[in-house]
Image (tube, grey):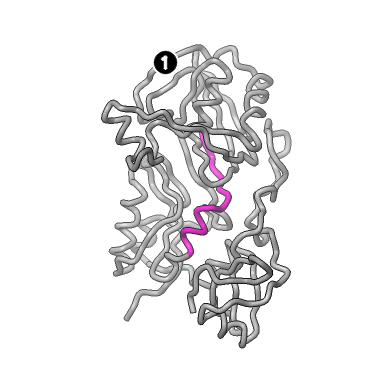
Amino acid sequence: MSPASGLVIVDKPGGMTSHDVVARVRRLAGTRKVGHAGTLDPMATGVLVVGVEKATRLLGYLTLTEKEYAATIRLGQSTSTDDAEGEITGTATGANVTAETLAGAIAGLTGEIQQVPPAVSAVKVGGQRAYRLTRAGAAPELKARPVTVYEFTVTAMRRDGQLLDVDATVRCSSGTYIRALARDLGAALGTGGHLTRLRRTRVGGYSVADARTLEQLAGRFEVLPLAQAAAAAFPRRDLSADEARRLANGGRLAAAALPAALPAGAAAAALPAGAAAAALPAGAAAAAGPVAAYAPDGTLVALVTEESGQARPLAVFA
């Protein structure tokens, strides 16, 4: 009997790579057809979306969705990796940073920005991963890339001598490095900065409240069925029986008034009252993208996209 197709929303523990989590889920699911959407660094915890069997076809589209993090940034120290796992490479006092100067620096890192990925990252340069080149002593010069930070909210500040720890919520586009935000915030303030804690709390419509630990999964392994998994992440189009048959066979459909926004619950909540923040309006991330198409019986038929007045399948599941 084949394993059920669906998503597993894992609450990744610290100290494990995303690949380690996938390997564990493979054993629990009894199949090698398992993958994940959006890598988390070993020190990071929180939402890691894992696909099993047919659900692996969703993963490439889920990596493009908005993400949300709870982070702690330490101002006053720079590190070789822009996080706590690297060696300290510079120090400067963060004692003079005020809530006002912090808010000004954060405003400059909110919205559509150009971000240089960390030198120790999985970005490819000439076919090689940047982190491998860096560790071999040939750190590449990485180019800035456009990313969008929809929200950068300070939730707490703690001083420890010359150091200032800043807790923050960050809501951002795919491809945004929170380590790089920590680095650039420190640079903007003249203090240096690095990430000391990172917890991903949401990927698209999948929240940490929906996530299960590996220990919980070992006790009872279940997947979020395909139809429910897609409904949490993509707008919906209901098909007639004839449309469902055509789409299942790779055919195209007439264009429909496809919604441009993610379903309810996928957008971030309003900012906390009184929080120091810089933000774009909630839902600013919404853009035309894949739509989940359902048969009359509620079965997920395909992900579709519109082009040239037609809806064509991106991935077929029926």
Residue 67 inside the magenta-drawn segment: yes
Label 1, on which residue? 90
Q: Position of residue 212 (x, y in %)?
A: 44, 58
Q: Secondary structure at mark 1?
A: strand
Q: Position of residue 48 (x, y in %)?
A: 44, 53
258 or 156: nearer the viewer: 258
Q: Position of residue 7 (x, y in %)?
A: 45, 65
The quadrant of the image that shows the N terminus is bottom left
**Residue at image location 61% in from the left, 33% down from the top:** 155
Place residue 241 in its image quadrant: bottom right
Place residue 96 in its image quadrant: top right
Along the horizontal axis of the image, is 112 left or right of 221?
right
Within 10 Å of the Cα at label 1, are there few (<14), some (14-19), or many (20+) other Cα atoms?
Answer: few
Dot 1 amino acid type:
Gly
Q: Is residue 66 above or below residue 119?
A: below
Residue range (magenta): 58-72
**Residue at image location 33% in from the left, 51% down from the top:** 19
